């Protein structure tokens, strides 16, 4: 029996259909990659199978005996407990057994011989449950996973002291410690550095149970999955094999579909031509009617339009002076210092990646260099007089503003038609352009933010994790655009495969931490 079975599911929001009569099966031990362009409905699929939202039609059935782990970003972490205490809650049932066991030990002292034997039997049973569940190695399990995910340095911190990225990593660690029968992983690498991604890759490759993975890191996905479900044009198609095999099979499938479509169109044209010429002639009317019936019964092949691919071209304003920025004894942070004193220098046309573990201060450094926040000590010398700055923030929108109005407000001199073209070049459709920002997927929102940066002439770009939520096509196009950009770039990124061909220098924050 399947772990999860979805049959003939249809789901939409208003007039927009997301899934049209789709089916899906997850078998024991399968490692599934759920792939598709931004906005196709991958995260919505997770919400449907976890009962967060209900389908308009069809059935979703789980095997009653399975446990499901889903990293819900809205889960509250108690502000009054440490990270270690929160992770221990993954073993809450085992700690309750231990509590009952300790109560039984206390009862032994006052029990008579008969009662003592009963308690001994209960103790033996509970002790066996704990040993079978590796209860006495919980601390070592927590240490191993916290180190792998990269949260070992703040295990004694409370949750209100964590950054958003650190919080996501803690939730991921807890889910892995729970070892459910199926993991639902939505962009798990977004807040991990390279070392942690490698650890998670190794962990998932050897994971004995099942998982469904959404990730735009195709290199990561390719190494950990054995099945692909491709979401495109409201349909789900299954491909056995890794991501690279899927790409080959998908291309073969499209080529065959085009051949079948072309052949069928020739047949349709031939039938229509015969019907048109012969249906009014008495001698051939019967044959024409027969061909008309054949045409009506024909299962017509539909070729869906390809999703528009983005075309990013950053507008360059003017050459900058030879030295763009310098720092002297710069110490960054908010309440406490995150770095040693830094003496940094950036020259004209340099492209620099800022890397390091999550929460180490990459975004804080970026904002300090831009003078958005004040340093704890030292100073930043930024050649603002000769710089036109483009800035991409990684925060998501939750506004009711319509997309076209958002960009029109940013570029008041442009006509609505020009604004539509700007958004279309970023890979957004008319449906996206006329939607509210809060209704868009994370990837679509990212494209709206990129639209603002791309269309403002600049000679230096400050980009904070610009690939988060972007689909494969958009990420590849952004990489090409940044390689070709004539100005300078300061780029915060955890994705080495993305930044390695762009940058001329790397600033590793690990080397500067206090």
Image (tube, rainbow, N blue to C red):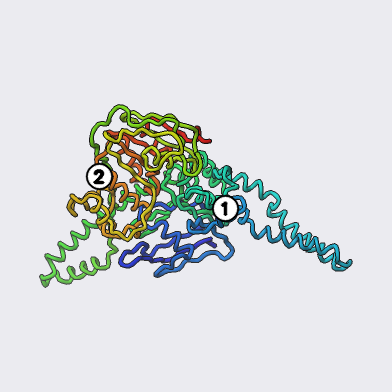
Horizontal arrangement in the rendering, residue 229 relative to residue 261 (left or right): right
Q: Which residue is mark 2?
A: 455
Can you say whether 411 is above or below 62 in the image?
above
Q: Position of residue 508 (x, y in %)?
A: 46, 34
Residue placed most toward the observer, 248 or 416 = 416
Vertical placement of 348 versus 491: above or below? above
Which image quarter: residue 11? Answer: bottom left
Disc 1 residue crowd, few under 14, some 14–19, many 20+, Cα 10 Å: many
Q: Is 158 displayed left or right of 36 in the figure?
A: right
Which residue is at a point 47% across and 62% down the rendered structure image?
49
Residue 310 spot, x, y in % from top left: 29, 47
* Gap in angstroms between the C-alphas marked 1 and 2: 42 Å
Sooner in the amino-acid sequence: mark 1 or mark 2: 1
Is residue 57 in view from this perspective?
yes
Q: Residues within 10 Å of mark 2 (few under 14, many from 20)?
A: some
| Secondary structure found at label 2 | loop
Total numbered labels placed on residues in the image: 2
Where is 111 relative to 447, above or below?
below
Quadrant in which the N terminus appears? bottom right
Residue 41 drawn at (x, y percent): 38, 58
Q: Residue at x 47, y 52 (%)?
A: 213
Residue 348 picture location, percent across and down: 31, 29
Q: Residue furthest right?
A: 113
Q: Image check: 470 left or right of 359?
A: left
Viewer-proximal residue, 365 or 228? 365
Badge 1 is on which residue?
174
């Amino acid at each position: 029996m399947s772990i999860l079975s979805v049959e003939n599911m249809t789901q939409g929001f208003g007039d927009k259909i997301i899934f049209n009569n789709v089916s899906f099966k997850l078998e024991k031990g399968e490692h599934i990659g759920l792939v598709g362009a931004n906005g196709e409905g991958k995260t919505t699929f997770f919400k449907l199978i976890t009962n967060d939202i209900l389908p308009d039609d069809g059935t979703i059935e789980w095997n009653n005996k399975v446990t499901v782990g889903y990293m819900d970003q809205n889960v509250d972490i108690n502000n009054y407990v440490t990270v270690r205490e929160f992770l221990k809650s993954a073993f809450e049932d085992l700690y309750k057994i231990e509590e009952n066991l300790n109560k039984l030990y206390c009862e032994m002292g006052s029990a008579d011989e008969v009662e003592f034997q009963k308690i001994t039997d209960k103790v033996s049973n509970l002790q066996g449950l704990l040993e079978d569940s590796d209860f006495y190695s919980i601390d070592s399990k927590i240490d191993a996973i916290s180190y792998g995910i990269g949260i070992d340095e703040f295990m004694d911190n409370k949750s209100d002291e964590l950054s958003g990225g650190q919080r996501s990593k803690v939730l991921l660690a807890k889910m892995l410690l729970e070892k459910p029968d199926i993991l639902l992983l939505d962009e798990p690498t977004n807040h991990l550095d390279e070392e942690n991604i490698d650890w998670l890759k190794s962990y998932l490759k050897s994971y004995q149970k099942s998982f469904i993975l959404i990730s735009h890191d195709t290199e990561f996905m390719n190494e950990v999955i054995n099945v692909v479900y491709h979401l495109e044009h409201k349909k789900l198609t299954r491909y056995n094999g890794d991501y690279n095999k899927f790409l080959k099979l998908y291309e073969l499938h499209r080529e065959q579909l085009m051949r079948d479509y072309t052949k069928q169109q020739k047949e349709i044209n031939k039938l229509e031509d015969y019907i048109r010429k012969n249906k009014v002639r008495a001698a051939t009317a019967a044959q024409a009617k027969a061909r008309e019936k054949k045409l009506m019964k024909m299962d017509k092949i539909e070729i869906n339009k390809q999703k528009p691919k983005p075309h990013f071209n950053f507008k360059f304003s003017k050459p900058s002076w030879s030295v763009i920025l310098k720092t002297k004894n710069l110490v960054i942070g908010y309440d406490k210092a995150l770095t040693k004193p830094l003496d940094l220098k950036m020259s004209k046309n340099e492209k620099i990646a800022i890397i390091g573990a999550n929460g180490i201060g990459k975004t804080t450094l970026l904002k300090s260099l831009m003078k958005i926040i004040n340093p704890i000590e030292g100073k930043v010398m930024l050649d603002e007089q000769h710089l036109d700055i483009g800035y991409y923030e990684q925060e998501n929108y939750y506004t009711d503003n319509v997309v076209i109005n958002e960009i029109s407000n940013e570029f008041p001199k442009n006509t609505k038609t020009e604004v539509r073209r700007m958004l279309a070049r970023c890979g957004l459709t008319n449906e996206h352009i006329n939607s509210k920002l809060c209704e868009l997927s994370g990837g679509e929102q990212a494209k709206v933010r990129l639209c603002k940066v791309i269309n403002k002439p600049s000679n230096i770009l400050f980009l904070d994790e610009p690939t988060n939520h972007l689909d494969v096509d958009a990420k590849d196009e952004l990489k090409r655009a940044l390689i070709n950009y004539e100005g300078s770039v300061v780029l915060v990124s955890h994705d080495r495969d993305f930044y390695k061909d762009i940058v001329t220098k790397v600033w590793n924050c690990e080397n500067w931490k206090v």
